[in-house]
Amino acid sequence: MDLERIQHHLRDAGLDGWLFYDFRQSDPLALRVLGIPADMHTTRRWFYYLPAQGQPTKIVHRIEAGVLDRLPGEKLVYLRWEELHQALQRTLSNARRIAMQYSPMCAIPYISRVDAGTVELVRSLIPGIEVVSSGDLIQQFEATCTPEQYESHCAAADLLGRLVQETFAEVARRVQQRGETSEYEIQRFVVEWFERENLVTDHPPIVAVTANAANPHYFPTKDRSKPIRKGDLLLLDVWARLNRPESIFADITWMAMVDSTVPEEFSDAFRAVARARDAAVAFIRDRLSQGQPVRGFEADQVARHVIEEAGYGEYFIHRTGHSIHTTTHGNGANLDSLETMDERVLLNRTCFSVEPGIYIPGKFGVRSEIDVFLWDGEVRVTGPEPQQEIQTIL
């Protein structure tokens, strides 16, 4: 845990402190920010208060009095619930505005880790105290990247770009030789490619043909897989990272037409998606060039407006993008005004996807997904260039 860095961000945010709370690993964000092993056995509540200035305070149960010994600060030990309340009152007596892993109205469920009763307890013990979301603080420690992590992402993105082309070539080869392949066979081709290139992932990729591509989270299995033949539209969504500690994921989606031409129905929808993708990136770049912050929901609204104007609004059924870090879906700001109203700021040295899509049930789906890094004033689109239209592969 970097105490000085955390306190610096607390002061910048105008906060008196950050109150961490956990019960039986209920808050993995707290464990990671504080550097507490996730497998540490705990059965009692603990609190850790990190003030904007001065020394932290640990509040622990007598049975597990050593649970926070790895962290700096004064230790207060309780046994009875009344003693726990007294310790909290003493610790927070001078605080007026503190952060917790709390999201008003559960707007950002990624951050909403502290139960409502515990927030109520804090408010009842310190009349007038303001409990605010730690969402932007969490980003500083869960979403920002080092230069080495940025390079790991770029390396993974370049590999995925090569994978896409090799996968499309393999689909074309099998269709030309055998007349067809299958979603599951191509999924296994990608998984084996990952293994050869020493990439790791958390789930096999999405390989979806025509009507199956209308389901954004469709995954083929051995027992549920459609054939891929000439005339089919193919969606390939792949994500992976280098097989080394703290490397950052890359996550891209490309479309292919298993034919020599693309039907107008598919190309019209994809053009709307591509315009939405590019409009979101241009909006972010323009705002940052003017020194203005960008919030996740704003970028989503820009992309969504383009698709609505094209007449496909009802078929854009997910957010525009998600945070990317050491997990595919990270804990930074998402580009979202649909599923949540994500008011978190897109921070420097964070990565996120931009992936608008159109999904017409029973017919087809199209998506284009790129990764964007905000790096010291620059908006860097990583991975394969140029950003594609639907690629013909026969």
Image (tube, grey):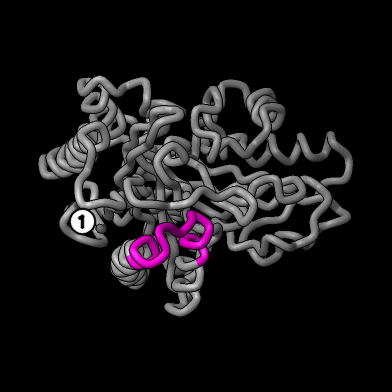
Residue 184 magenta: yes
Residue 146 magenta: no
- Residue at left offset 16%, top offset 56%: 386
- The answer to whether residue 102 shows anywhere in this view is yes
Report the magenta stretch's main SS.
helix
Write down the residue under mark 1. 380
- The answer to whether residue 8 shows anywhere in this view is no
Whether residue 389 sits left or right of residue 202 in the image: it is left
- Residue at left offset 41%, top offset 26%: 338
- Residue at left offset 36%, top offset 28%: 316
- Residue at left offset 31%, top offset 49%: 255
Q: Magenta region: which residues?
A: 173-188
Whether residue 68 sits left or right of residue 56 in the image: it is right
Q: Nearer the viewer, residue 258 or 158?
A: 258
State which quarter of the image contains the C terminus: bottom left
Residue 380 quadrant:
bottom left
Q: Nearer the viewer, residue 245 or 310?
A: 310
Q: Residue 281, percent across and down?
A: 20, 43
- From the viewer's perspective, is residue 17 above or below residue 254? above
Whether residue 328 sits left or right of residue 277 in the image: it is right
Q: Nearer the viewer, residue 387 or 39?
A: 387
Q: Residue 284, percent across and down?
A: 20, 41
- From the viewer's perspective, is residue 174 above or below residue 256? below
Q: Residue 276, percent across and down?
A: 22, 35
What secondary structure is found at the residue carrying circle 1? strand
Three-letter amino acid code at the position of disc 1: Arg
